[in-house]
Image (spheres, rainbow, N blue to C red):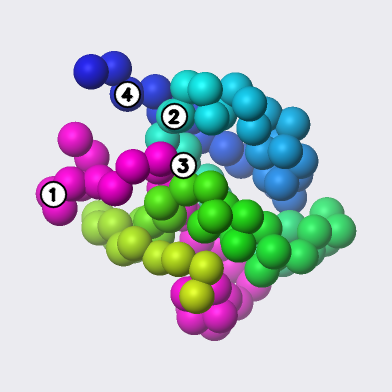
């Protein structure tokens, strides 16, 4: 099985990228590495909580912490925000649940 993977780092324009590329993303269902920076997203005029809610509604979202993955959902945004403050968090977005050992 070929697993398509893309890395997104567009300094606050992530929501526009997802909105503009939704058909292609849904068609190919890649795994996506996304750097989440609430401050940068807010500076681009987007509400970071709404952006994260959009991600959690479309994907299975994992937070990359060290060398492990932790599944998070829309209810976890406040905790995520407290953890990273004005920093960043790396997310892995998938259209399917990952195996317990990580990526299949």
Element under disc 2: loop
Residue with the mark numbered 2: 30
Whether residue 10 is visible here, answered yes or no, is: no
Q: Which residue is mark 3?
A: 33
Q: Which residues are magenta?
A: 76-104
Q: Give the mark nearer the N terminus: 3 vs 1.
A: 3
Up-down: is 48 above or below 10? below
Q: Residue furthest right?
A: 45
Rendering coords of residue 41 (x, y %): 73, 58
Q: Could you tell me how far apart the alpha carbons at marks 3 and 1 are, in whole angstroms?
A: 18 Å
- Tell which circle, 4 or 3, labels the residue nearer the N-terminal end: 4
Whether residue 6 is in magenta: the answer is no
Q: Residues within 10 Å of mark 2 (few under 14, many from 20)?
A: some
Q: Is residue 96 magenta?
A: yes
Answer with mark 4 or mark 2, whichever residue precedes in sequence: 4
Residue at which label 4 appears: 3
Q: Quadrant of residue 69?
A: bottom left
**How far apart are labels 4 and 3 at the CA level?**
13 Å
What residue is at 54 percent from the left and 55 percent from the top?
57
Q: Is residue 32 left or right of residue 1?
A: right
Quadrant for the C terminus, please.
top left
- Pointers 1 and 2 in contact (CB under 8 A)? no
Placement of the N terminus among the 4 image quadrants: top left
Please tell me how crowded label 4 is: few (under 14), some (14-19), or many (20+) other residues with Cα within 10 Å: few
């Amino acid at each position: 099985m070929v697993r398509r993977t893309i890395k997104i780092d567009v300094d606050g324009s992530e929501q526009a990228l997802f909105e503009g590329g939704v058909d292609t993303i849904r068609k190919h269902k890649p795994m996506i590495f996304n750097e989440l920076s609430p401050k940068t997203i807010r500076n681009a005029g987007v509400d970071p909580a709404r952006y994260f809610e959009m991600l959690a509604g479309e994907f299975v979202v994992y937070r990359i912490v060290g060398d492990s993955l932790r599944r998070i959902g829309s209810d976890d945004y406040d905790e995520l925000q407290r953890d990273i403050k004005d920093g960043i968090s790396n997310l892995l977005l998938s259209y399917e649940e990952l195996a317990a050992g990580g990526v299949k």
